[in-house]
Image: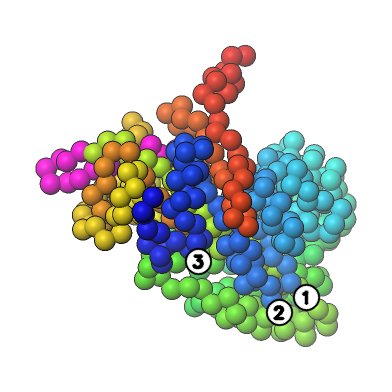
Amino acid sequence: MNVKIFDKKFNKNNISIKTILFLIKKYNTPFWLYCAENIKNKILQLKKFDIIRFAQKSCSNINILKLMKYQGVKVDAISLGEIERALTAGYNPKNINDIVFTSDIFEKKTLKRIISLNITVNIGSIDMLHQLGKISKNHNILLRINPGFGYGHNKKTNTGGENSKHGIWYKDLKKSIFLIKKYNLNLIGIHMHIGSGVNYNHLQKVCNSMLLNVLQPYMPKINIISAGGGLTIPYKKTDSIVDTNHYFDLWNKTRNILNNFFKKNIKIEIEPGRFLVAESGILICQVCAIKIIKNKRFVLVNVGFNDLIRPVMYGSYHYISAISSKGRDMSNDYKTKTIVAGPLCESGDVFTQLENGEINFFMLPKVNIDDYLIFHDTGAYGSSMSSNYNSRPLIPEILIENNIPKLIRRRQKIEELINLELC
Ligand SMILES: Cc1ncc(COP(=O)(O)O)c(C=O)c1O
């Protein structure tokens, strides 16, 4: 088939069209496709940090977790489900800090499991201190501090400041330390994740705030400072690439000051989701209908915001490329303004939209029915945020490693959805 590789700059995983067409034939569209080598490369870029902890909410497939574990990456869990996923992937709470549970609440069943497995908890509320402290003496904890400000690529991803539900308000730190001592909890670290899409100016502010909060006479000797996640990736061609060395240097300077203060070696932990997996993933779908409304060209595909919610939720941009189903090379085709939308019974089910919900467009070749579209950089908060809205089953996930594709989640069956309700 004489088709060219899609836009080189956005074929970040070097996957050929031939491979994609082979997978389409084998599994049908739509599906998620990840590249293991891309993830390994991202891990390498963070090797200076003492601990890399994967925020599994970004892509929680057990096979991705296994890959992380094999590469020496630890894991974060925010629910009982995520704890069970980590355990299934082989993480062992007996290895100190293999799994850290980060949350602002305990659900009863989750707390029971945490205590029985002795899982370290990153505490996000004073109530959690009481609830854990009363029943589990000497439990290892970190405190997640809301430093009073936040940052995010969207206000919904800003996790700091007075409008955020996350973390312990910085003014409550002294009270928290008092409770930790009262309950004999073991404070091993301080954590700050202020949001996703962090830039260096804000990062400096976070480092300064870490110092301000930790350099207090009442602060016990800690072992770890956690920088949280938030490292960006270039979704657009014009987006810059995060300088991980600079990122590390800022945190390293912070750590050195704390080392002097506590007279011990403190570890720096980083907790990315997006940075590790976003660029490894693409979403492949098929064109089902084309409508011209006034002068607007709508291309409707077989995935909706039940599969990929980021554009609807945040107005997020994903680069889109096209593959002809007829083997036609479209790489030099004239590009036209195209609105790309899904099948859901929701007018907002549009992938090309701005943060305020206004319809936008993407410049695409004139695709036809049955051609394929690829949404790029969808490895993070793609599959893991999918739902069954409109009773649409979850779609398969495939991982390519050393050029060998492996199905890592099969397509959900409609009967499986229906069976849940036959009780
Ligand atoms: C506590 C915590 N850590 C890490 C992350 C990962 O963020 P990102 O994927 O932007 O790196 C999140 C994201 O919501 C988070 O809430």
The total of numbered circles placed on residues is 3
* Residue 160 part of the magenta-drawn span: no
Residue at (82% x, 72% y) in the render: 221
Q: Position of residue 363 (x, y in %)?
A: 26, 57
Is the distance from the Cβ of mark 2 to the nearest ligand 1 atom less than 8 Å? no
Q: Earlier in the sequence, mark 1 or mark 3?
A: 3
Mark 1 or 3, closer to the camera: 3
For the magenta stretch, what is the residue range? 291-306
Residue bearing mark 1: 266
Which disc, if any, is residue 232? 3
Q: Position of residue 313 (x, y in %)?
A: 41, 48
Identify the amino acid type marked 3: Thr
Residue at (65% x, 51% y) in the render: 64
Residue at (51% x, 61% y) in the render: 13
Judge the density around disc 2: few (<14), some (14-19), many (≥20) Cα neighbours within 10 Å. many
With respect to residue 391, does 285 lie above or below? below
Residue at (31% x, 54% y) in the render: 329
Discs 1, 2 touching: Cβ within 8 Å: yes
